[in-house]
Amino acid sequence: MKSVALPLIALLAFTGYTASVMFQAEQSLIDFGISLMSRPDTAQVVIDLYLLATLAGVWMYRDARSRGQSALSVLPYLLITAVFVSVGPLLYLVVRGLRTSKTSPVSHQEA
């Protein structure tokens, strides 16, 4: 369960902040993206972010396959990553951690 704590905290905090910002936004998510790409300085940050998101997507795919999961099992996380970059990998880490803790035997030390 310890392996889930940090990604879960980050997921909840960032998702809550994102939802708050989106509810207060005066423009749509698409308009916001277009405005970010209209200037070279902010476009560079967006491109950098999506390069990192692509690397995270490749990692999620390879990790799921190495764990015996189908390629389609990663699709929801990839779709979320395409829109809310950090949320997809964070959610993947939380779900993976929960699955791992359920399938691994719990070791108890005798007193």
Image (cartoon, grey):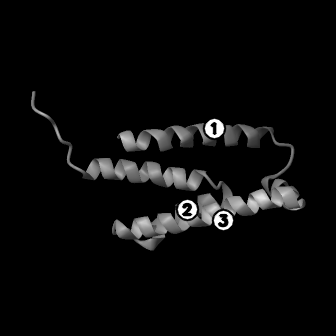
SS of the residue under disc 1: helix
Which residue occupies 78% across, 53% down?
A: 29
Q: Identify the image quadrant of residue 49.
A: bottom right
Please say if the residues under marks 2 and 1 sit with CB atoms less than 8 Å apart. no
| Disc 1: CA contacts within 10 A as few (<14), some (14-19) or many (>=20) | few
Q: Identify the image quadrant of residue 41.
A: bottom right
Which residue occupies 34% across, 52% down?
A: 99
Where residue 16 is drawn, which disc sits there?
Answer: 1
Q: Identify the image quadrant of residue 25.
A: top right
SS of the residue under disc 3: helix
Badge 2 or badge 1: first in the primary sequence: 1
- Residue type at mark 3 is Leu
Where residue 56 is drawn, which disc sits there?
Answer: 2
Between 51 and 30, the one nearer to me in the picture: 51
Can you say which quadrant of the picture contains the N terminus? top left
- Residue type at mark 2 is Ala
| Disc 2: CA contacts within 10 A as few (<14), some (14-19) or many (>=20) | some
Q: Position of residue 52 (x, y in %)?
A: 62, 61
